[in-house]
Image (cartoon, helix red, strand yellow):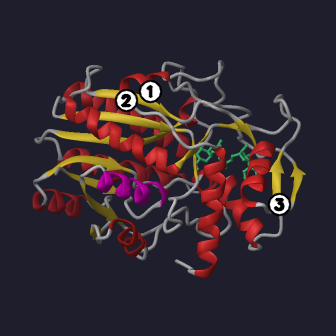
Amino acid sequence: MSKILVTGGTGFIGSHTVVELFNAGYTPVLVDNLSNSSIKILDQIEKIIGEKPEFHQFDLCDAAKVNEFVAANPDISGIIHFAASKAVGESVQNPLKYYHNNFFSLINLLEAYREKPINFVFSSSCTVYGEPDTLPVTESAPVKKATSPYGNTKQIAEEILEETANANKNYQFIALRYFNPVGAHESALIGELPLGVPQNLLPFITQTAIGKREKLTVFGDDYETPDGSAVRDYIHVVDLAKAHVAAIKLLEKGNPNGNYDVFNIGTGNGYSVLEAIKAFENASGQKLNFEIGPRREGDIIKVWGDVTKSTKELGWKAELGIDEMMSSAWAWEKYLKDNPIG
Ligand code: UD1
């Protein structure tokens, strides 16, 4: 069965995608520099799928290494490119790290495949929409000026792919615009492993509930939303992983829309921060210690996706709801307490 290169394969979304590729009959080949993930994730994946996936540790910013890898692996038919730096706040502090890591890795991969047909799925973000003018936001909504260097790397990367697709028909691209990935595999053997203090909502909630953090601060309750807190489209990471398999399948079949295409990957439902907390409390049976604090600079007020295009043209739809997102994230946090991975 086809070999698919998964860059960032030991990361949060990467590891879940490796499992779903394997379940769909593909042979995933992982590359990661382990800058934001643990080698122990390979053992965790093995516990789920029954074998250790092929793994290569190197930095995709090293063009010589990328070329060497591509030459040694001529049977790779598709790439799912996750490897990138992704902390919004850090990107504001250190923009060059973001432009360096996120662009050199992408360009090195693309250049290595200049002469060979390749299916390529790119990890993009709903951050490209900024604060949308209409909701739910569709793929044809305008791309707004990015509010962080991280967001800008996603916007520019999409442009790089589109222009490269126009110039060279060897490349078949799909960019997936993720909404807010949360949750963990149902086995509780893989999940999100934030470094240091989590910046994202769900790991902060679960770490507070387990006692690693004292309390969660809700960033603002005076927005123009039903309960005043900000609204997001949370998507279960296993559904998100399956969207990548669907994208690879569409590329293998031939995408009638051409060799560059984008899809929203969300559930189409928006939940406020306060609703997310309630859902966590219901799913876990834990009372969460939280307080209302000031708004976080740069935050979007509300965003959720129109998933009509991904449902019809990608043949993919989210199956798991907010309860499964919360209960799986909680099961993973509890697993980590007894089985630290770091
Ligand atoms: C952010 C980025 C997005 C990026 C994603 C990567 C912005 C504007 N967006 O999404 O581009 O793809 O991270 O993971 O930075 N919240 C709290 N308390 C907390 C943490 C979060 O109230 O301690 C709230 C936030 O204000 C927000 C919601 O929870 O309303 C979700 O926040 P988060 O998980 O950080 O994701 P985004 O900000 O949506």
Q: CA distance from mark 2 to mark 3?
A: 38 Å
Residue at image coords 42%, 33%:
316
The residue range painted magenta reads: 12-23
Give residue 311's mark.
1
Task: Return the residue nearer the eye: 334 or 300.
Answer: 334
Residue at image coords 56%, 39%:
179
- The three-letter amino acid code for the residue at tag 3 is Leu
Q: CA distance from mark 3 to mark 1?
A: 35 Å
- Determine the secondary structure under disc 1: helix
Tell me if 69 is positioned left or right of 246 in this view.
Answer: left
Task: Return the residue nearer the eye: 215 or 129.
Answer: 215
Q: Are marks 2 and 3 in contact (CB under 8 Å)?
A: no
Q: First in sequence: mark 3 or mark 1?
A: 3
Dominant secondary-structure state across the stretch colored magenta:
helix
Q: Horizontal and vertical percent for residue 217? A: 83, 55
Q: CA distance from mark 2 to mark 1?
A: 6 Å
- Which quarter of the picture shows residue 263? top left
Q: Residues within 10 Å of mark 3 (few under 14, many from 20)?
A: some
Q: Horizontal and vertical percent for residue 296? A: 77, 46
Residue at image coords 32%, 70%:
50
Q: First in sequence: mark 2 or mark 3?
A: 3
Image vertical order of residue 161 relative to residue 312, above or below: below
- The three-letter amino acid code for the residue at tag 1 is Thr
- Determine the secondary structure under disc 3: loop
Give residue 208's mark.
none
Give residue 314's mark.
2
Report the residue marked by disc 3. 288
